[in-house]
Amino acid sequence: MARAATTADAFNAVAEPRRREILDALADGERPVNDLVGLLDLAQPQVSKHLKVLREVGLVDVRQEGRQRLYRLNGPALKPIHDWVKEYERTWSERFDRMDAVLDELKRKDEGDGTDDK
Amino acid sequence: MTSSGTAKVTLPGDKQILITREFDAPKELVYEAWTTPELVRRWWCGERGEMTVAEIDLRVGGKWRYAMIANEGFEVAFHGEYREILPNERLVSTEAYEGIPDPDEHAALNTLTLTEVDGRTTLAVLVEHPTQEGRDMHIESGMEGGMQEALDRLEQVAVSLR
């Protein structure tokens, strides 16, 4: 099933490499937009555009402090992505559990037919 | 539950995902279970569905194709080509998910390595996406079909925030 090209959820928002870089930068703590401009070597309008997308899906929060707007990562919004990785891990765990059963059988067969090719 | 435990998934690089697991069996048997169609049929689906296709032409340049009908009713299929074969030790192959446009263009390169110590074998699968585009496409394609994707350091961030 194709996903919409819009940035409707966290997955779409993080599909853009520069937005992932912003999230990585914010993982270390709150930052004003100018910090991000310097870190990413991107023009301020571009950074602002990415931040807008990230705010729309809730991955980033903003607060005003004096004349600065400070951006921070909203961890819980990453949960769907974390869940995906966990699901991926679970898929492989299920496969490997079944492989255990297959291997037990192969081991018994090896012992059973008396051949030893070691 | 055995002490072999669960699969461990880590993200060693921006375009990589590494899956590891220890088995209480010699590497010859793990390799046999990994490369024999009748045996692959018994484990590849996990608890997710029924395997409908398990084709393996185990030679360099040979093709493979796996397909399953998921419990939810849809088909999930992957295919690829063997690039390097060192029996019982190492197997390099491509892996394309058929659920996206131009699957082969975005195929990942998978390297299986088997390391045996005292009769126990550590299996490792390193999945590498060739391009940023391929990786991003997999993210765009979403959750369907067990997409094989490393999400940069985001997963680690998510774990640290749990």
Image: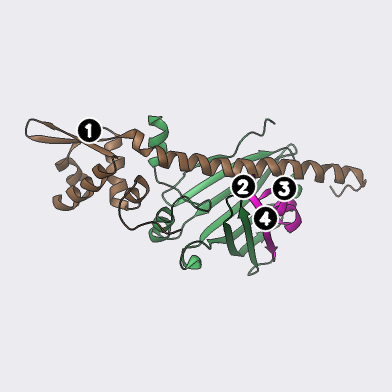
Chain colours: A brown, B green
Q: Residues within 10 Å of mark 4 (few under 14, many from 20)?
A: many
| Rendered image: mark on residue B30 | 3
Please, what secondary structure does the residue beneath circle 3 have? helix
- Return the residue at label 1: A30
Query: Do the residues indicated by labels 1 and 2 lie within the same chain of the protein?
Result: no
- Return the residue at label 2: B48
Q: Residues within 10 Å of mark 3 (few under 14, many from 20)?
A: many
Kind of residue at disc 2: Arg
Mark 1 belongs to chain: A
Q: Is residue B88 visible?
A: no
Using the numbered discs, state the Cα–Cα distance from disc 2 to disc 4 in whole angstroms. 9 Å
Using the numbered discs, state the Cα–Cα distance from disc 1 to disc 3 in whole angstroms. 48 Å
Using the numbered discs, state the Cα–Cα distance from disc 1 to disc 2 in whole angstroms. 41 Å
- Return the residue at label 4: B51
Pointer 2 and pointer 4: residues touching (CB < 8 Å)?
no
Magenta residues?
B31-58
Kind of residue at disc 1: Glu
